[in-house]
Amino acid sequence: MKNVTIGGVPEHFNLAWYLTLKNGEYKEKNIHLRWKDYPGGTGDMCKALRNKEIDLAVILTEGIIKDIIEGNESKIVQTFVQSPLIWGIHVAHSSPYQTIKDLKGTKAAISRYGSGSHLMAYINAQNNKWDLKNDLNFEVVKNLDGAVESLTNNTADYFLWEKFTTKPIVDNGIFRYIDNCPTPWPCFVIAVREDFLQSNKKDVKTILNIINNTTSEFKDIPSIDKTISNRYDQKLEDVQEWLSLTEWSQNIIDEQTITNIQKQLFELKIISKMVDYKNLISIL
């Protein structure tokens, strides 16, 4: 049996992986797939891919593109979630800040440099015509728990994280939600280490076929909204709204989209250069 390790955030987007693992679908194909949670998000997973701690990752598109350009020897093999990620902009419940305008020049909590929370702080700043050099400051907090601690203790002022994941924290009166900042591109892709892909292409294809069969029918699974609500401690109406906004993909990310993402990252000085499509993508 082939041992394969995959990483991802412990969030509702990845429930399809849990379901296919629970059903033993990979073992039926002689693959022992082990899932590893990364609460720290994309920055942590980029590091894990580089260190060969994982073979595959379900990872934010902008984060893995940046890291591949910076030397991560991995390739994107598929889009996982086609729809944008809706980042909520949050402050502590008792914070004096009421609008995005108030946050100009204050300190953003980020899980780590190169993470989605870091990169989207730049997108938010650009959207609001801030000075990227002078109006952005960062405090590294590692993960969502770290952000709660940092905002509560005033070591950071605001935090960008997926809106529905943070909704229970807002409902509990710990965070206060100010506004949205959606990604202007498909939010999650599946990336694979190049050395692993070269010698295990057939197994990677099998894994993708299994997960794609589930995501293509995910919304039709009986009572899937209640399952998500119970598992991730979210209100049923929030889950239903999230399901209505979320579209999974079973296809490779196209060249035009990759070009558009790189252009935005380059303009924001998040990446130092743009590279060819084939340097980022492997078509199986």
Image (cartoon, helix red, strand yellow):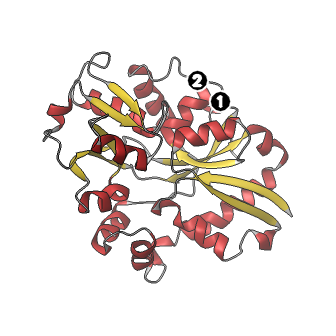
Of residues 187 and 102, which is closer to you in this image?
A: 102
Q: Nearer the viewer, residue 169 or 3?
A: 169
Query: Measuring 34% from the left and 55% from the top, which residue is drawn there?
Result: 166
**Residue that lies at the very extreme toward the bottom in this rendered image:** 222
Q: Residues within 10 Å of mark 2 (few under 14, many from 20)?
A: few
What residue is pinned by disc 1?
A: 279
Residue found farthest to the front:
153
Instruction: Using the image, determine if residue 90 lies above or below residue 136.
Output: below
Relative to 277, residue 12 above or below: below
Numbered disc 1: secondary structure: helix
| Residue depicted at 32% across the width and 16% down the height | 133
**Which residue is found at the position 33% from the left and 24% from the top?**
137
Q: Are marks 1 and 2 in contact (CB under 8 Å)?
A: yes
Q: Is residue 281 visible?
A: no
Above or below, comparing residue 91 to residue 209 in the picture: above
Residue 228 drawn at (x, y percent) = 43, 72
Residue type at mark 2: give it. Val
**Up-down relation of residue 39 to residue 105 (above or below):** below
Measuring 74% from the left and 40% from the top, which residue is drawn there? Answer: 52
In this rendering, would 146 be left or right of 93?
right
Q: Could you say where residue 204 lies in the image, as x and y percent from the top left?
A: 74, 54
* Element assignment for label 2: loop
Q: Nearer the viewer, residue 74 or 131?
A: 131
- Name the residue that disc number 2 marks: 275
Q: Is residue 76 left or right of residue 217?
A: right
Q: Which mark is drawn over residue 52?
A: none
Q: Quadrant of residue 99?
A: top left
In the image, what residue type sits under mark 1? Asn
Counting from the top left corner in percent of width and height, residue 180 is at: 26, 46
Distance between the alpha carbons at the discs numbered 1 and 2: 6 Å
Q: Is residue 20 left or right of residue 131?
A: right
